[in-house]
Image (tube, rainbow, N blue to C red):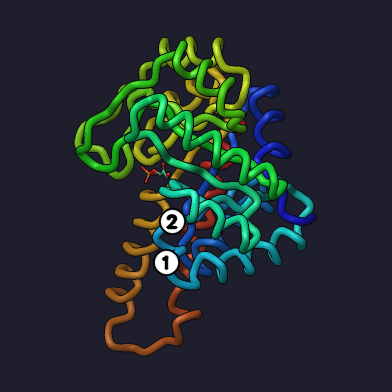
Amino acid sequence: MPLVTLNEILPQARRDGYAVAAFNVANLETLYSVVRAARAENSPLIVQVYQRLFEDDRAELIGVMARRLAEQSDAPMALHLDHGGTLDRVKQALDIGYTSVMIDGSALPFEENIALTSQAAALAHAAGATLEAEIGHVPFGDGEVKLSDAAEAAQFARQTKVDALAVSIGTAHGFYKKAPKLDIARAAQIGQSVPIPLVLHGGTGVSDEQLLSAITCGVAKINIATELQNLFIRGAAGEIERNGDNFKPVDVYLKPVEAQLFDYARAKIRTLRR
Ligand code: 13P
């Protein structure tokens, strides 16, 4: 089927109590592995791309491949800009056919985040796409966590017309130095105050048990980048060690790595639908 928006995937997930994996892909191998994993599970999928890949042709080229792969599949798949920083970036993604975008105003004061997100929502909706935005702040690495507030989340969702809301409940992007402990009580409060699907960023390194608890609170999209991409890099390094000086063409070299990514993505997709 053609690529779909988040609205064809997430409201049903929230209603039925499961989450859809949103994998950050960066090349053919990462894309192809997660798409094949979703197909094997007959599961919806969100393919997302960090905004730095929009600085050259990569995001567009990945989009062409994703569109083609979606058309060959019966399960719905969305193509999403992750952490768009500006309205220009949002427009660029919409122009090249992304069916969903995120505007990240989470570092701005609340009212400014509302204003920016409202503008991005208008752009996305005019293009027939969906918008994700963030309230509170999920940091990258060691940055400071700013937890989301339920009353603010409700006001934000109402005023901005955002389609999916990323919330900060104790996660961060990247590997954790100390195992994270999610604030599930806060997530539950937010879930009761906000009817739209919630998004959890920083899915790497969060235990399955905590992910499943977050899902019961209304989280319907779980973002995973670091764990998947690290598997690709470590997998390739492992192949170099195994093969020594023997030359193999790139596609042959990376086949076993793709198999690892497929297994990882398939297991994660299955867990989130438990
Ligand atoms: P991780 O890199 O921690 O998996 O987070 C991914 C993410 O939230 C992308 O927006």
Within 10 Å of disc 2 (Cα), the crowding (few <14, some 14-19, many 20+) is: some
Res 244 quadrant in image: bottom left
Give coordinates of residue 92: x percent, y percent.
54, 60
Question: In the image, is 126 to the left or to the right of 241?
Answer: right
Residue named by callout 1: 55
- Residue in the image at 55% along x and 11% along y: 193
**The disc label shown at residue 160, or none:** none
Q: Disc 2, ligand 1: is the CB inside 8 Å?
A: no
Give coordinates of residue 86: x percent, y percent.
44, 49
| Front-most of residues 117 and 4 | 117
Q: Is residue 84 visible?
A: yes
Name the secondary structure under disc 2.
helix
Question: In the image, is 206 to the left or to the right of 144?
Answer: right
Give coordinates of residue 246: x percent, y percent.
34, 88
Res 149 quadrant in image: top left
- Residue in the image at 76% along x and 62% along y: 72
Q: Are marks 1 and 2 in contact (CB under 8 Å)?
A: yes
Question: In the image, is 64 to the left or to the right of 183?
Answer: right
Up-down relation of residue 2 to residue 172 (above or below)? below
Q: Is residue 44 visible?
A: no
| Front-most of residues 136 and 90 | 90
**The disc label shown at residue 51, or none:** 2
Q: Disc 1, ligand 1: is the CB inside 8 Å?
A: no
What type is the residue that disc 1 sits on?
A: Glu
Up-down relation of residue 58 to residue 218 (above or below)? below
Up-down relation of residue 211 to residue 216 (above or below)? below
